[in-house]
């Protein structure tokens, strides 16, 4: 079992060089050190500071950790980062990276993380990039080992659709499936276990699958996508009927 994280959160840090003078926060579990005074941890928390760039990150990890190349978890959430630094590529064992609550606005910044083959968890919500069209699918396509994004699991269907969209060079599909859209209530209210947001997501998912199905040139790809489209449409129909049963909108 590894030691707890080296906790340098809430230290009002503006640069990483300032952090070397800090004493890590103590938790329930005690950090152990080697003979040269370095921690045996594989995780570092630098969240909730005022860090705007990652200059000196390698030095900081070497200062605190006995084996900085084995860093597996890094929390940089709630800072002022505008870019994803290529320094992450010097962390081949990185598995969890928290970047939510920063100022990242360019979706292509995520491409710098492509070579992190063990990165299975990332957070980017609370950045401007979150509002970019195709945001989630792009991140999933770029990071092949990703299992959780923004504290939400990555499904097999999401992975397949993201790979087809971006690795196949397709543009982001637009529109919704009018044939199965039906009527909607308002206010994000949830009835019968189905919210407005969930219904919208399923309409868009069905439309995406259909658009991609029509753009594929090979029969196996068409067959697979058509199956996904029909599954999404059936789920939407089932939800619509469920909402009717709960009086969400009247039967016609």
Image (spheres, rainbow, N blue to C red):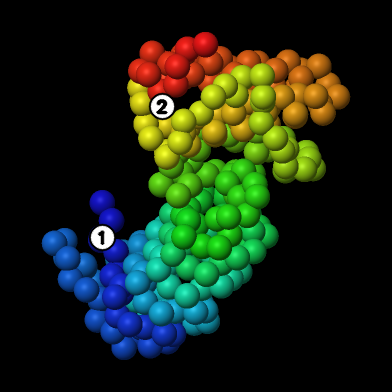
Asked if the residue under mark 2 is in contact with the one under mark 1, i.e. CB atoms within 8 Å, the reply is no
User: Dot 1 corresponds to which residue?
Assistant: 3
Crowding near the residue tagged with mark 1, few <14, some 14–19, many ≥20 C-alpha atoms within 10 Å: some
Spot the residue most to the left. 28
Reply above or below: 106 against 176. Answer: below
| Residue at the image point whose x is 48% and y is 56% from the top | 125
Q: Position of residue 145 (x, y in %)?
A: 54, 43
Which residue shows up at 50% across the image and 57% down it? 124
Kind of element beneath mark 1: loop
Image spot of residue 228 (x, y percent): 63, 20
Query: Residue 55, which numbered label?
Result: none
- Front position in the image: 50 or 27: 50
Camera-near label (1 vs 2) is 2
Corner quadrant of residue 201: top right
**Res 248 → quadrant:** top left
Q: Earlier in the sequence, mark 1 or mark 2?
A: 1
How packed mark 2 is, by other alpha carbons closer than 10 Å (few <14, some 14-19, many 20 or more), is: some
Residue 7 in view, yes or no = yes
Find numbered disc 2 in the image and state the secondary structure of the residue it sits on: strand
Residue at 46% x, 60% y: name it. 126
Q: Which mark is residue 194?
A: 2
Residue 224 visible in image: no
Q: Residue furthest top?
A: 252
Q: Position of residue 139 (x, y in %)?
A: 60, 49
Please tell me whether residue 243 is drawn above or below residue 30 in the rendered image.
Answer: above
Q: CA distance from mark 1 to mark 2?
A: 42 Å
Residue 186 as seen in the image, left or right of residue 170: left
Q: Position of residue 203 (x, y in %)?
A: 59, 28
Q: How many marks?
A: 2
The residue under the point 13% across, 62% down is 28
251 or 237, which lies in front?
A: 251
Residue 171: which quarter of the image? top right
């Amino acid at each position: 079992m590894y030691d707890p994280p080296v906790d340098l959160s809430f230290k009002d840090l503006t640069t990483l060089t300032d952090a070397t003078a800090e004493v890590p926060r103590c938790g329930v579990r005690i950090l152990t050190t080697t003979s040269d005074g370095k921690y045996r941890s594989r995780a570092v928390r630098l969240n909730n500071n005022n860090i705007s760039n990652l200059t000196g990150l390698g030095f900081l990890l070497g200062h605190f950790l006995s084996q900085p190349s084995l860093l597996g978890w890094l929390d940089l959430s709630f800072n002022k980062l505008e870019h994803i630094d290529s320094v992450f590529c010097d962390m081949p064992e990185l598995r969890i990276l928290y970047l939510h609550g920063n100022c990242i606005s360019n979706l292509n910044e995520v491409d710098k993380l492509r070579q992190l083959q063990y990165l299975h968890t990332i957070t980017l919500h609370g950045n401007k990039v979150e509002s970019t069209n195709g945001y989630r699918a792009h991140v999933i396509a770029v990071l092949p080992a990703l299992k959780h994004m923004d504290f939400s699991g990555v499904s097999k269907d999401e992975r397949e659709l993201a790979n087809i969209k971006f690795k196949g060079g397709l543009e982001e599909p637009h529109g919704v499936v009018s044939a199965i859209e039906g009527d909607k209530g308002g206010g994000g209210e949830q009835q019968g276990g189905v919210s407005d947001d969930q219904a919208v997501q399923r309409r868009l998912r069905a439309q995406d699958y259909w658009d991609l199905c029509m753009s594929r040139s090979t029969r196996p790809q068409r067959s697979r996508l058509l199956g996904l489209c029909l599954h999404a449409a059936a789920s939407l129909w089932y939800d619509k009927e469920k909402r009717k049963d709960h009086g969400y909108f009247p039967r016609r």
